[in-house]
Amino acid sequence: MATNLSRDAEVGASRPTVLVVDDDEDLADTCRYWLEDDDYRVRTAYSGEDALEAVDDEVDLVLLDRRMPRKSGDETLDVLREEGYEFPVAMMTAVAPDTDIVDMPFDEYLVKPVDRDDVVDTADELLARSDFSEEVREYFALEATEAALSTREREALRDEDQLVELQSELDESYEANEEAIAQREQQLERLTTVNRVIRRVDRALVDADTREAIDAAVCEAVVGTEPYRASLVVEYTDHSRGVRLREAAGPVAGDADIAGDELAGGVESAVDDGELKLLPDPDVALDGFEDGVVLVTPLSYREKSYGALVVGTASDHTISDHETDVFAQLGARIANGITAVEQRRLLLADTVAELEFRHGDRSDPLVRIATETGGELSLRGIASNDESGLTCFVDLVGGDGEEALALAAELDAIANARLVAGGDESLLELSVTEAAIETLSAVGATVRSFDVQDGDGTVVVEAAPDADLKAIAGAVQSAYDDTDLVSKREVERSVQSTESFRQGLSDRLTDRQQAALETAYSAGYYEWPRDSTAEEVAEAMDIAAPTLHEHLRAAERKLLESFVDETV
């Protein structure tokens, strides 16, 4: 039986929680996958009865099917309102709307079939509406009801007079709250605009397979959405101390010189400070940037910087706080995508740079665990985790696993710890926020091994031949005093058949599928009996078990495809 200890049970608690209720289990699970991929926490219920069991004060939003056996969605909605739940509810159903919906206390009405954008856009908008006044929320709910009924011919409705009364009530509500409604409509329009940018960029990151392709796709994705007129990806590093244009979209020329422009100062400031900068009235001699506010978003993934995304807006566009928050997050997502592409390039390279470090600094939690338990620690596997640094799996030989688990729970640098298997050879799952392997991974190196014996550790990492090796070494040595670079060499990968297999598999797997496969393998999910359950592996990745199974099924199928293609 695996043992869990966590110092921070609230990780991710700030994410909105959606309850999806549908007797079509496949659709409910698909909606869960869509929403979780958009950073929602999701619960699923496959009946009205299950929904009433699953609901509590932590639920922020409900997607509710109308036509379900035993307890219908209409009945479930009535019970939820009778019990005092005021969260927004979207009816999601194949039932054609009729005037019986006029008095139903829902906030939005979706007619199946629905796609990813329908579900996620509705969730985004309803959560935004939650902050509106009661009168304005009521107006938008009435508008949703009227919009649903307007899809039907009037003569086909049971009671045409009810639609007329509804439209009259809607007009009265608008007249009484016109200014507030207009303001909120503008807010929702901006929300839709920003979300459209996010999805366009996300699709670009999925499709791109090189850094250059990401730069071009991101610029085009941003400019393809009003009110963003022009966009640039620029390069700036502490090492170069200069700004260089990598890609451009919109009216700006792709070979524009921005080195001496005021824009360059904004880029330097954003990258150095690690935060988005607004240039309200910049003196910029570039087409597309001369009138409106300019956003400068650093492209930073953990401690690795890839420059900045620069966006020029229309002259009449005012930047909202929500917009700046989203673009700041977008910068991190783009940088994460670039990191994934570079790691994939490293995986497929014929030649890599290998760095070996001696690392005995006891401020590193892994070194401390090995030293204080008197055991030998070795890294079995590692998976990236945006919220808590890295989730790693380590073998501990000769030390007490329970003692190591208790020590891990006391260390600030470890967010979560789990004893996967005990005995003479223990396996621990550790989510580390500060460690040498986390620092090295953050600056773009791939950790190949980490072993600690008698309080002294050895770390071996690989990097692309053209990587800034001095910066990689400097990052870990500045963070940990008792760390020395022992060797640096170029390694030729000689087994072409293995690399061919890796290339075929890497081309097929998405980043999430690869992470699921590696995490499950490292956690002993494929052992028999299993060292970790699907729920435990999913928790390590901060996703739901159905989502994990979907990633694993897809990854396993692609793994077999690669095996057959390369060996048959």
Image (cartoon, rainbow, N blue to C red):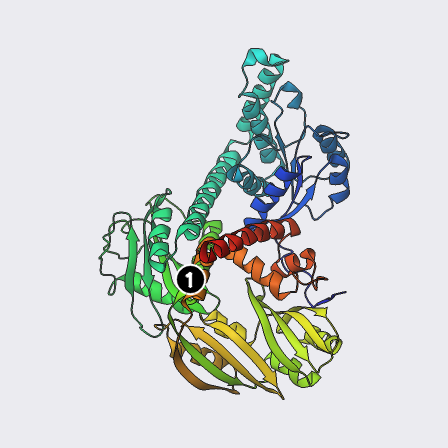
Q: Position of residue 63 (x, y in %)?
A: 64, 37
Residue 551 visible in image: yes
Q: Position of residue 420 (x, y in %)?
A: 70, 68
From the viewer's perspective, is 203 left or right of 35?
left
Instruction: State the image quarter where residue 245 is shown.
Output: bottom left
Residue at image mark 1: 500
Q: Nearer the viewer, residue 292 or 295?
A: 295
Against 416, residue 153 (above or below) is above
Q: Nearer the viewer, residue 511 or 525?
A: 525
From the viewer's perspective, is 120 left or right of 95?
left
- Report how many numbered discs are placed on residues in the image: 1
At x 51%, y 31%, the residue is 178
Against 310, residue 153 (above or below) is above
Residue 509 visible in image: no
What amino acid type should be assigned to the residue bearing mark 1?
Ser
Q: Nearer the viewer, residue 390 or 210?
A: 210
